[in-house]
Amino acid sequence: MGEDQGQFWDRVAERYAARPLKDPAAYEEMLVEVGGWLQPGDRVLEIGCGTGSTAVRLGGTVERWLGTDFSAEMVRIAQAKEAPEGVSFMQASAETEHDEAPFDAICAFHILHLLPDAPATLAALRRQLVPGGLLISKTWCLRDFNPLMRMIFPILRARGYMPEIRQIRARELRAMLTDAGFVLQGERHFGTHRHSRFIVARRAE
């Protein structure tokens, strides 16, 4: 039996934390975009926060930022960082329902394609949003990749270089969000990664 998601990310956490950004300009552009959707009084939940880089950068612009990840090692690295007041990290699965809910916004960056049951998780996230609250996501739509490139993914997975990944198309991602009770507000990509879809969706009233 292969590793589960938590085990995989625990194993690669230190290496992941030390790896430089491949496209710093695109990341900075994303931070500006996300910040434009948030308000100073917002309470934000981030699932799949990893080593906490985005929480540290944006957490000081809102009232509360709770970063969660299913990897204990990722959370440990995040907790060691100097974060703004109101930012905290905890180990939790993506579908965990938190006592602090409801949130004004939920961020899910590069995690929806890693979930074994994304529709169930989206339903749990919707329940934790205020009416009209935002789900701000960025998701790899690997099914839209060149077929030759997609052949590499199972090889990388078998060799332990890649976690279990759900291959979806951008149109399937949009349908998944609308089926879960969200209204799409905007979609784009940053830099050259056009298959990494940034989508903002609002919880339907």
Image (spheres, helix red, strand yellow):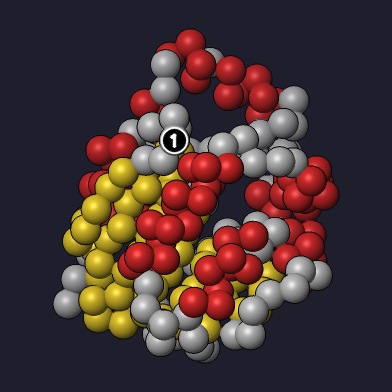
Is 143 in front, or is 85? 85
Q: Is residue 98 above or below residue 175?
A: below
Quarter in which the N terminus is drawn: top right
Residue 57 location, x and y as percent?
A: 58, 65
Quarter of the image holding residue 119? bottom left
Judge left or right: residue 145 versus residue 164.
left
Task: Name the residue tied to disc 1.
Answer: 191
Is 21 in front, or is 2? 21
Q: Residue at x 47, y 80 (%)?
A: 62
* Residue type at numbered disc 1: Gly
Quarter in which the C terminus is drawn: bottom left
Residue 113 location, x and y as percent?
A: 47, 44
Q: Residue at x 64, y 60 (%)?
A: 53
Q: Is residue 91 visible?
A: yes
Judge left or right: residue 68 versus residue 12.
left
Q: How many marks?
A: 1
The secondary structure type at the circle numbered 1 is: loop
Residue 164 location, x and y as percent?
A: 60, 39
Residue 56 location, x and y as percent?
A: 63, 68
Q: Residue at x 43, y 45 (%)?
A: 139
Q: Residue at x 33, y 34 (%)?
A: 169
Is 2 in front, or is 184? 184
Is 179 in front, or is 62? 62
